[in-house]
Amino acid sequence: MRIAALFTCIIGVFMLATSVQAAQPADITRLSNGLTVLVLKDDRFPLASLRLYVHAGSAFETPEEAGISHLLEHMVFKGTVKRPKGQVARDVESVGGYLNAATSFDYTVYLTDMPSTQWKLGMDVLRDMAFEPALDPAELESEKDVVIAELQRGEDSPDSRIFQSLQAGTLKGTTYERPIIGYRETIRATTADTMRAYIRKHYQPQSMLLTVVGNVDPAEVRAEAERLFGGLTNDQNITPPAAIDARAFAHGPVVNVEHGPWKKVYLGVALPVPGLKALQAAQLDMLSQLLGGDPTALLYRTFKYEKQLVDDISVANYSFERVGMLYITAELDADKVETFWKELTTMLAGLKADAFTEQEFERARLNIEDGLYRSKETVAGLASKEGYFQFFSDGPQGEANYLQAVRDVERPQLEALIRDWLRPERLTVSVLLPEGTKAPALAATLKSTWPSKGKAAEEGNAAAVGKTETVDLGGGRKVVLIPDTTLPYTALDMVFSGGNALLDQNRQGLAALTASVLTKGTLKHDAPTLEAFQSDRAASLGASAGRRTFTLSLREPSRFDGDMFGLLHEVLTTPALAPDEVAREKRNQVASIRAREDQPLGLAFRHLTPFLFPGHSYGFYHLGQPETVEGFTRDDVKAFWARQAAQPWVMSVAGSFDREAVLRFAKSLPAPSGKPVSLDAPAWTPEKALDLRLPERNQAHLLLVFPTVGLAHKDTPALELLQSVLAGQSGLLFRDMRDKQGLGYTVTAMNWQSDLAGFMVLYIGTEPGKLEQAEAGFRKVIDQLHATALPDEELRRGKNQMRGDYYREHQRLGSRSSEAAMLTSQGYPLLFNREVIDKAEKLAPSDLERVARTYLDMNKVRVVKVLP
């Protein structure tokens, strides 16, 4: 009835290798609780295939829970709250449907394949199985015997024993070292209560994907999904699992030999490699195909066909979510082991990309793509494909990236892959020998034929390690390297000291104008040519000015790094700053000022810091005033850039890049000649109120602005937590002032901090006649914070929100690159923001009460209003 646990571990790899873009795009929505719904209409057959993916498999288990995911998968067939034992299968099969489930390392999937007229029944069954299993204790004890019998069957299989031995040795110290099925003692120790606790922890809607493919109406599917799943809630904050550094497993080589009741020798070799989201995953699939993917592949042709040393040999790349395993297995006679082992290790030690012809490269690409396209043949295959790519690889774009990565593998990429990942010190070898057979000296042979390449080679390409590195080039130049090979993209941010801090009072807006003009042409490329150059490479280059920084940002597919680094070099060293472009950007900047002042919040925030910090560069109008901007000339822009370009800088690069190429590029740029800008802390305005007018508008806007402290202050974690508790749809302000009093559509809190100053804003947009009531509402919440410690659940919500926001914001390469460059340029550690969250998680209600009393002081507040 179920897929054997031995094989479920490779379902993800199989789906990855048998996926293809659907003829029409999928309909993808997200319910309010975070559950994703993917619907793809395919009317070739009167069928519908449904999959419910849960981001919980054996790699999410504790050592004591080993096997609980797989055992739970068994138990859902033993009855649910509303369907007694056997009824689940009867309901599905009585209408001609098919029911199954599977457990992997990284996920569990529940599936039904139904006649298209019965898809609603299939969806109801999936919800029932996942969220309301009966978990009868007597049935659980009975099913444990079934699972242990399954475990014993695996132990009787040489293929299973080899895989589990290599899995445990290669990925030792990770959650992937344990078999999906678990161990006898952990299976026996599992109870219905521990299963329910496991479900409560991991079966969160935000960590699930419902996929429906077939002859269905997407709108009806969405509505039914909302009805069945929309009421489910999340009660855990889910942190995405971090990738595991495959280079850390340099523990070998390790050779394990075991005798048993076998007639043949079973030999396996495994190496840790990057996981499925890394760029190298597609490259490793190519290498596996070239080495052992079919009878034309190098190892099969050499050792099976030409030398006849093995009965069978194969190569596979197992791409798990966080890490991977390159896996070579062979079946042969005992008297051929020593010869085969010597020749295999000699071949691997000397393997070069030149060992493969162009025809073999093209054949490998074709066969991988063929596997992807063949999944379209069945509705079930298409459902599994769509679901898997959506769940783990950003949907169709992830699939397209994978295919492109396969097509992009040429000899240089393959050579680097072989050099970096086929290393004997990471090797784990497992051999099953027939009883009475003398164990060959495999370790000694390996040491002779394939010696370790040493530490120098290990450090040769640090950018692939996955660890962030800061390189000080001296002379006011630093480079931060953040390797992430998940996708073949690069994000670069270059942050100079300077920005508005370099300006005089009468030059407000010049830094922003220079940033706009800077990327509008070089001596080699005029503006249209420069734009076309970027567009041809799906790249972008931009510049921006801040209060005391000036930033250039580059984003591109990694294969265009060389081109875009060259373009950035041009922009930095030979910008055109053409008079026509200066005139055009002046018009654009004045238009932006006027457009901003047409928007209530745009008007408020444009005037906020000039009101708060008069006479200081923090209080400059970022875009300037229209009459000032209109008076700037090309000479003004040119003079400012000359001064700005001489400032110290930090370059941060995130993504899939060549470390040495990045450092060569950084060293090729002119060294800074100026000193970093130094500023005193701004003085706050003595004025207590600012009223701004925006006639003929319906709403008024109220901002209460409280002075706080700079980023380095010890109260920063508490201020961030206070903002998190106040803001959001479940925050104190929203619940009281919107939900209870109905004062406005938007009510929130914002915490702004720089290195020299800070403030917290309480904001609401409301009817003009309700401004006094709104201000009283803010005062009421503040008084409560002063008088009463917050309940623990409020703090827990705020802390969870902080961490969730942090990880959501750090998914993009650009966010990580810009954060690292900005923090480093201002002298903060790279993990500063995460450390703030860590410190916030240790805070007690009394800490927030103290901070609220200290900073939310109505005697110090500045009130800003936008009035109609």
Image (tube, grey):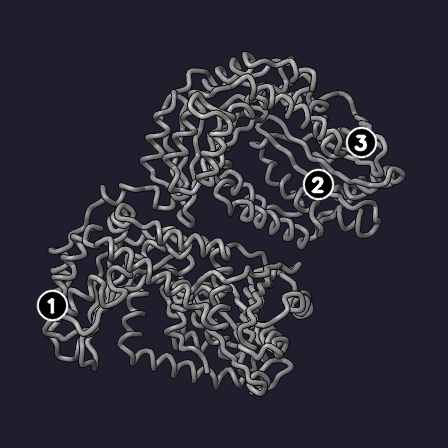
866 lies above or below 118: above
Question: Which of labels 3 and 2 is toward the front?
Answer: 3
**Residue identifier under label 3:** 865
**Crowd rating for badge 3 (residues with CA inside 10 Å; few <14, some 14–19, many 20+):** many
What residue is shown at x 27% (from left), y 71% (from top)?
Answer: 162
Which image quadrant for residue 694?
top right
**Residue sitting farthest toward the right:** 769
Compute the Cα span from label 3 to label 1. Answer: 85 Å
Q: Earlier in the sequence, mark 2 or mark 1?
A: 1
Q: Which x, y percent locates residue 291?
A: 24, 61
Please name whichever residue, 428 or 514, is drawn nearer the observer in this view of the structure: 514
Are circles 3 and 1 on residues that touch, CB within 8 Å? no
**Residue identifier under label 1:** 307
**Residue identifier under label 2:** 749
Q: How many marks?
A: 3
Kindly tell me whether residue 619 is visible in this rendering: no
20 lies above or below 644: below
Element marked by disc 1: loop
